[in-house]
Image: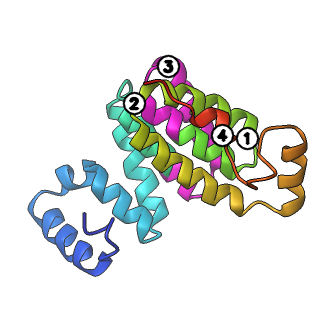
Amino acid sequence: MLTINGKLDFAQKAFNDALALDRSSTEDYGGYVYFLIATRNLVEGLRLAKRHLDAHVIDLRARIRYAEALAAADQVNESLTILEKAAEMEPGHSQVHLHLAQMYIKMQQPREALRHLEHARLLVDKRTLDAVVVSCEKLFQSWPDEVKRQWSERGLVTADRDSFPPPSLLVTEG
């Protein structure tokens, strides 16, 4: 929680204490991996995330953790491979589809992002979907104007709103 709230100095002290008490459990804790990533200790974060994945091969959360560490280390293609395999293993796992959608938006591939957002729309509540769409929207806004224009012409983004995804995705049943 300290890492999420940006209190990295407090998190550092807490993790130092935890490591002194039980190094193995602390290194296996997902929050510690995220702390390492947040503090740009990517080599150690990747090592621990991979070790956790190797010990928990069928755990999709372990795959997501490792994929996030890879993405933070600018190993995007490897991250996508891990997430796509996770989606094949468990097509109904919403978090995998949500992460894939965000990764594909970062890579300026809205067609793939939409495919995963459509899966997620069927799996998550509206509040969760709205939060992811806001995140995708922010990522989309960072695209060069020329790329946004090209995708608008293809109908994958809405030119009048200058946004992603198109409103049709946001129509949910119920």
Q: Which mark is residue 60?
A: 2
Q: CA distance from mark 4 to mark 3?
A: 24 Å
Residue at horizontal 20 percent and vertical 71 percent from the top: 16
**Res. 74 in view:** no
Tag 3, which secondary structure? Answer: loop
Reading the image, the residue beneath label 4 is 167
Tag 2, which secondary structure? Answer: helix
Hey, what amino acid is under mark 3? Answer: Pro
Circle 4 residues within 10 Å: few <14, some 14–19, many ≥20: few
Q: Is residue 45 magenta?
A: no
Q: CA distance from mark 1 to mark 4?
A: 14 Å
Residue 126 at x, y percent in the picture: 43, 37
Residue 88: quarter of image: top right
Residue at horizontal 31 percent and vertical 76 percent from the top: 8
Q: Which residues are magenta?
A: 69-98
Residue at horizontal 29 percent and vertical 58 percent from the top: 32
Reading the image, the residue beneath label 3 is 91
